[in-house]
Amino acid sequence: MIFSVNYEIWSIYPQFKEETSRFRDQNFYQPDHTSDFDYSLAFITTSNEQEYEELLTGIKNVALNNNTAVKIYKPQLSGQISSGDYLQIASLSDYDGIILDSRDPDLTPTINNIAADTPVVTIQSDYPDSNRLSYVGINNHRAGFQIGRILSENINKNQKLVVFSRDQLTTDISSSAEQLKIFGLQEAIAASGLIENLEIMDTEVSLLDVSQKLTEILTDKSKNEITAIFTSDEELTELTLQLLPNIRQENRPDFIGYTSDQNLKAQIDQGPITMLLYKNLNEIGNKAAKEMLSYLNDGSVNLFSRIEIELLMSRSFKERGAESSEINELY
C-alpha cells in the first residue's frame, strides 16, 4: 500500500520518529508490563483530560483482559500534528487497529485511505461516509426526545422553554450530535402542541455570551415566563452552571444539562440542576475496545453500538410532582 503522508510530518521528522516509537513510552500501555501481547491498538483522542481518562479506563479494562497493548496519541489544538496525521502515523506503525475519538470535520478521506489495512472504530463523533469499521456512541436524538417529553408534561401554554445551542457557525463535527438532541426535543414538544413555547438561541461557547443570553431571557418582559433552560452541549452546560447560582432562587428557571462528568452527576441534588443527561465515557471506551477485538478475533462487529445514556432528575423536581416513569431508562 502506498501512503501520501502529510509533508509536515516529515518536516518534523524527529517528533514523527518519537511518535512511532512503540515501546519504552509513558503513553504506551502494556498489560503486565510485558512485550509479549496478542494485539496492539492505537487510541487517538482530542478529548479533554477528564474525558480522556474515562475513555482510556474503559479501553484499558478490555485490553488487560485480552492481552492487548494500547498506544495513546493526543493531538493538541496548537500542535503541529493533527488527528489525520496521527491516523497515518498509527497506520504506518503497524497497529492492529485504531480507536478514533476526534471532532475534526474532514477525516473521512484519511480513514478511507487506511481502513483497508488498519480497521478504525470511531467513538463519540462519527464519520458515517467513511469506511470505518464501527461507531460507538449514544442515541442523541432519543436523548433529546426524552427530555422534551418530560418537559412538555410539566409546562403550560404560558411558559417557555429555552435551548442554548452552539452557534451554527461552529464547524466542529460534534455539533451534529448536538443538533440531533435538539431535533428530538423539538419533536417531543411539537407532539404535545407546545412548539410555540420553544425558543432555540445560538450561543457562543463563552462565559460572556452565556451571561448575556441569561440576562436577556430573564429581563425581557415581552417573553412568556421562562420555566426551563436546556443546554445540549457539555461546555455550555458548564458555563451556565457557573452563572445560575448568581440568580435569586425564586427567579431561577429549571436547568437541564448534558455531561460526562461523574462529579457533576453526583451533584444532581446539590445545586441548580433539575435534570441531567449523563454520558458514560468509560462504557464507550470499553465497548469500542470490545468491538475492535471481536473483529480481530473472529471478524464479527456491530456497525453501530449504542451506549446507555442516563437521565437523572433532582429530588426537588420529583417532589413537585414530575412524572417519574421511564426516568431512569437507559437507551
Image: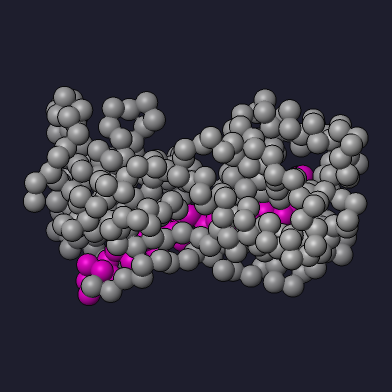
Spot occupied by residue 103 in the image (x, y as percentages of width and height): 42, 43
Furthest residue to the left?
1
Spot occupied by residue 163 in the image (x, y as percentages of width and height): 70, 45
Q: Residue at x 49, y 64 (%)?
A: 307
Q: Give 3 or 222, whichever is nearer the viewer.
A: 222
Whether residue 313 appears in this view of the structure is no
Q: Give 20 or 151, whichever is nearer the viewer.
A: 151
Q: Residue at x 69, y 39 (%)?
A: 201
Spot occupied by residue 6 in the image (x, y as percentages of width and height): 19, 34
Q: Is residue 200 left or right of residue 299?
A: right
Q: Is residue 11 magenta?
A: no
Q: Residue at x 31, y 40 (%)?
A: 83
Q: Residue at x 76, y 56 (%)?
A: 195
Q: Is residue 292 left or right of residue 7?
A: right
The span shown in magenta is 269-298
Q: Is residue 278 shown above or below 89?
A: below
Q: Is residue 144 left or right of residue 126?
A: right
